[in-house]
């Protein structure tokens, strides 16, 4: 009988990949973090379906604008002053804060995209199972989250249809905003109702009991090493004193951008189920 | 001396209430399930079927909001005190929505899921999965992603998964509610097969009783917090209370409508009765009356709609809907009924072709700003207001206290629901609210997507009256449904869709006369008698 795990990386390899790159994005200074973020976006975006990509881009642009504006409005650090206001308080608006905002937004987007593409390379059940062995309750939570995310996307399609039907009746902008808020709340409500059935199913099927076994203990294929190597290589490169290696010094950011896509070299079917 | 047999489930004097809501769901409930039983429990919306199923499977853990008195026992032991591992290995459960229950990335792992959680050795799990897959005919699906399967296939997978681990009893909470009629008719046969082959006791909570009654050995009615009836199905179906509440199976209903005393459960039984005592000769309606054509309100011309992500295509060459007529769109799950309605509404745009909408404004309720009214398959998609009252207020912006509105509120028993949030209503109440809204709106076109799916029998017949009234007032009604009896009762025309194409279209009686599955009970009986 075929083992579907053979097409996906060992859960620990997948987890290391995810944790490693999120760690690099969050803990390194801007040039490296930006390179890692772009690399993760390049890794994640091709694995999303057109529909997922559209939803992700919509969410991404909203968050990009919010995070960038937040920095621009409230962060006064920096030398290049774009303009200055005197009311209600005297303060400058700097190019540096704008840049800083864009970098933070890109980092956030990269983690969002990496998280959205996770089910493509780690099936939700295998990820949650790995976690549930160590932390049963946290594993259940992860399971519910991962099982609910795709449902959120499919429910959002339904809600958008409802929005489209209700919208033409009320031309007022304030009403439209109110309606969209209510519809998106309804979407969350619907998704949570589905999650209740998921949790019922988890409970009745013994999820979280230990010891747990696996019908097909996940094999560790040599190509799965690429998932482990990818973030490790990036960390090693960052630890090497770069000025001594001229070649790396010039290309370090390009290499870090390309490294997240390293596992894709193993085989094309790694990402198919 | 033989050891007395302990019942599988025993509920003794159970009273269950929600103090915060001032609601008592069960009142001194007594019920017993014995080994080898196959029990059907039906009940009106909100009667507590799901709560009872959760109680019996040990998953009613929301005790902070509940007050429970009395006992619920599994093999003589109180269910809440039992170890979860023990319960999971003995009791299998299936819930309404198969997609919300699916947890694994392949069918094979889905079936193995509980066994893995119970910690069985891998070799044993693989063997059991292989055997169960063979029994259920799932070998070709093992590598597929469960979420890509149809509702019927996935519910079968969930059943296989429950059977793999449960060694004693299966509890099923409305497993047929999301299945199309052909699949729903086959599912109970699968249950009968596993009961015979594996010796499991089965308890099924279901309101679609037609396919279940012929195969269960006990049928019970949960009503007003108690098990009112608990009888063998042949006697259950004779009970007047069943007919009063509208739970009578379709064949038995046909006999009742024809003033016959018999209440057969199956078509062969009905035919055997009628052979000895035949009904009056059937006058086949060969004359097709041509009703005076009213203005066209909707016209599809060479409409093609395709989704880019998959190969699904709607292809309608020519379809016209006239004012004042009811058109039923029949077809199985995935045939394209909902997509056709969304195209008619203008929510989806056709890839090519034209849809002409000619909604005469004279038909409209002057206060209602739209010319089309949509009853979506999931009622909550159209219920975004804060209260039932505001849903109705949206349709009557000038005055809420009109006699017409009061009449509608009273007709659909919405008085007590007015302050509630629509999303806190039960499925049947939401459907009633939308039907009341449709009557209030009196739209030029009503597009209803499975509007009666969640309604219990009383409101089902009220919905039929409503559609007739709206059509008489001039509304065109496009009704997407899998319910051939509903189409037979109210539709002037019927269309059968398959994979996005119209494969049959014409007057309803003609379409149903020609059908094998898409036909009414009356036609089935007549055809069997003609053989």
Image (spheres, coloured by chain):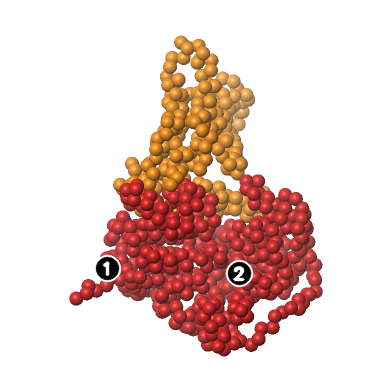
**Are circles 1 and 2 on residues that touch, CB within 8 Å?**
no
Q: Position of residue B511 (x, y in %)?
A: 69, 71
Q: Are marks 1 and 2 on the same chain?
A: yes
Instruction: Pinpoint the chain carrying mark 2.
Output: B
Identify the residue at horizontal 30%, vertical 71% (top origin): B7
Q: Residue A67 or B58: which is nearer the viewer? A: B58
Q: Position of residue B88 (x, y in %)?
A: 34, 57
What chain is colored red?
Answer: B
* Residue annotated with mark 1: B76
Identify the residue at horizontal 36%, vertical 45% (top origin): A214
* Residue annotated with mark 2: B517
Identify the residue at horizontal 69%, vertical 68% (top origin): B494
Reply above or below: B527 against B8: below
Q: Earlier in the sequence, mark 1 or mark 2?
A: 1
Return the residue found at the far front: B531
Q: Is residue B71 visible?
A: yes
Q: Residue B234 or B122: which is nearer the viewer? A: B122
Q: CA distance from mark 1 to mark 2?
A: 45 Å
Tell whether B527 sits left or right of B208.
right
Secondary structure beneath disc 2? loop
What shade has chain A been given?
orange
Of discs 1 and 2, which sits in the foreground? 2
Instruction: Pinpoint the chain carrying mark 1.
Output: B
């Amino acid at each position: 009988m075929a083992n579907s795990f053979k097409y996906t990386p060992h859960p620990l390899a997948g987890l290391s990949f995810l944790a490693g790159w999120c760690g690099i994005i969050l803990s390194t200074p801007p040039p490296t973090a930006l390179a890692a973020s772009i690399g993760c976006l390049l890794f994640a975006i091709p694995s999303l379906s057109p529909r997922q990509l559209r939803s992700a881009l919509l969410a991404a642009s909203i968050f990009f604008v919010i995070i960038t504006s937040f920095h621009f409005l409230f962060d006064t650090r920096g030398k290049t002053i774009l303009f200055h206001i005197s009311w209600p308080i005297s303060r400058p608006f700097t190019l540096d804060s704008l840049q800083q905002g864009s970098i933070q937004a890109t980092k956030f987007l990269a983690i969002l995209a990496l998280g959205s593409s996770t089910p493509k390379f780690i099936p939700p059940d295998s990820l949650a199972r790995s976690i549930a062995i160590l932390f049963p309750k946290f594993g259940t939570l992860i399971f519910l989250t991962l099982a609910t995310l795709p449902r959120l996307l499919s429910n959002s399609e339904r809600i958008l249809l409802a929005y489209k039907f209700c919208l033409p009746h009320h031309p007022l902008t304030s009403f439209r905003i109110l309606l969209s808020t209510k519809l998106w709340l309804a979407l969350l409500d619907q998704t949570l109702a589905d999650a209740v059935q998921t949790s019922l199913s988890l409970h009745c099927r013994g999820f979280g009991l230990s010891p747990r076994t696996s019908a097909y203990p996940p094999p560790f294929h040599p190509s799965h090493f690429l998932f482990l190597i990818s973030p490790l290589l990036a960390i090693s490169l960052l630890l090497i004193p770069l000025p001594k290696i001229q070649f790396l010094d010039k290309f370090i950011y390009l290499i870090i951008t390309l490294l997240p896509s390293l596992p894709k070299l193993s085989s094309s079917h790694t990402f198919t189920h | 001396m033989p050891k007395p047999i302990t019942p599988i489930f025993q509920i003794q004097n159970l009273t269950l209430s929600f103090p915060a809501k001032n609601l008592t769901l069960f009142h001194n409930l007594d019920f017993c399930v014995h080994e080898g039983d196959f029990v059907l429990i039906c009940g009106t919306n909100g009667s507590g079927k799901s709560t009872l199923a959760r109680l019996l499977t040990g998953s009613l853990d929301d005790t902070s909001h509940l007050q429970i008195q009395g006992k619920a026992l599994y093999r003589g032991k109180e269910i809440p005190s039992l170890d979860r591992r023990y319960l999971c290995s003995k009791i299998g459960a299936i819930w309404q929505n198969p997609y919300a229950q699916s947890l694994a990335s392949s069918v094979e792992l889905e079936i193995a899921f509980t066994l893995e959680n119970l910690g069985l050795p891998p070799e044993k799990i693989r063997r059991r999965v292989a055997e169960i897959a063979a029994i259920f005919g799932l070998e070709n699906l093992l590598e597929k992603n469960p979420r890509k399967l149809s509702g019927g296939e996935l519910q079968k997978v969930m059943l296989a998964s429950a059977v793999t681990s449960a060694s004693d009893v299966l509890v099923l909470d409305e497993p047929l509610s999301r299945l199309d009629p052909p699949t729903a008719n086959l599912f109970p046969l699968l249950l009968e097969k596993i009961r015979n082959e594996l010796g499991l006791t089965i308890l099924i909570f279901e309101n679609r009783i037609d396919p279940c009654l012929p195969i269960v050995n006990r049928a019970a009615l949960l009503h007003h917090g108690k098990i009112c009836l608990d009888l063998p199905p042949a006697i259950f179906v004779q009970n007047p209370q069943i007919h009063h509440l509208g739970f009578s199976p379709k064949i038995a209903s046909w006999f009742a409508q024809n003033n016959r005393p018999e209440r057969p459960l199956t078509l062969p039984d009905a035919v055997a009765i009628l052979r000895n005592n035949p009904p009056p000769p059937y006058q086949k309606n060969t004359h097709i009356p041509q009703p005076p054509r009213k203005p066209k309100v909707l016209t599809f011309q060479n409409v093609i709609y395709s989704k880019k992500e998959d190969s699904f295509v709607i292809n309608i060459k020519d379809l016209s809907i006239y004012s004042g007529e009811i058109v039923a769109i029949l077809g199985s799950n995935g045939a394209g009924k909902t997509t056709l309605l969304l195209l008619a509404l203008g929510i989806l745009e056709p890839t090519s072709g034209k849809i002409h909408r000619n909604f005469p404004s004279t038909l409209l309720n002057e206060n209602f700003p739209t010319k089309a009214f949509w009853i979506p398959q999931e009622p909550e998609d159209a219920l975004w207001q804060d209260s039932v009252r505001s849903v109705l207020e949206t349709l009557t912006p000038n005055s809420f206290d009109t006699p017409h509105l009061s009449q509608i509120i009273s007709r659909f028993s919405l008085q007590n629901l007015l302050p509630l949030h629509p999303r806190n209503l039960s499925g049947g109440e939401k459907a009633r609210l939308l039907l009341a809204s449709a009557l209030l709106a009196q739209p030029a076109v009503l597009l209803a997507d499975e509007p009666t799916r969640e309604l219990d029998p009383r409101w089902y017949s009220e919905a039929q009256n409503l559609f007739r009234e709206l059509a008489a007032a001039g509304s065109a009604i496009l009704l997407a449904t899998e319910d051939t009896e509903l189409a037979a009762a109210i539709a002037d025309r019927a269309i059968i869709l398959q994979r996005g194409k119209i494969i049959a279209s014409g007057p309803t009686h003609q379409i149903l006369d020609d059908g094998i599955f898409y036909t009414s009970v009356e036609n089935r009986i007549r055809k069997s008698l003609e053989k």
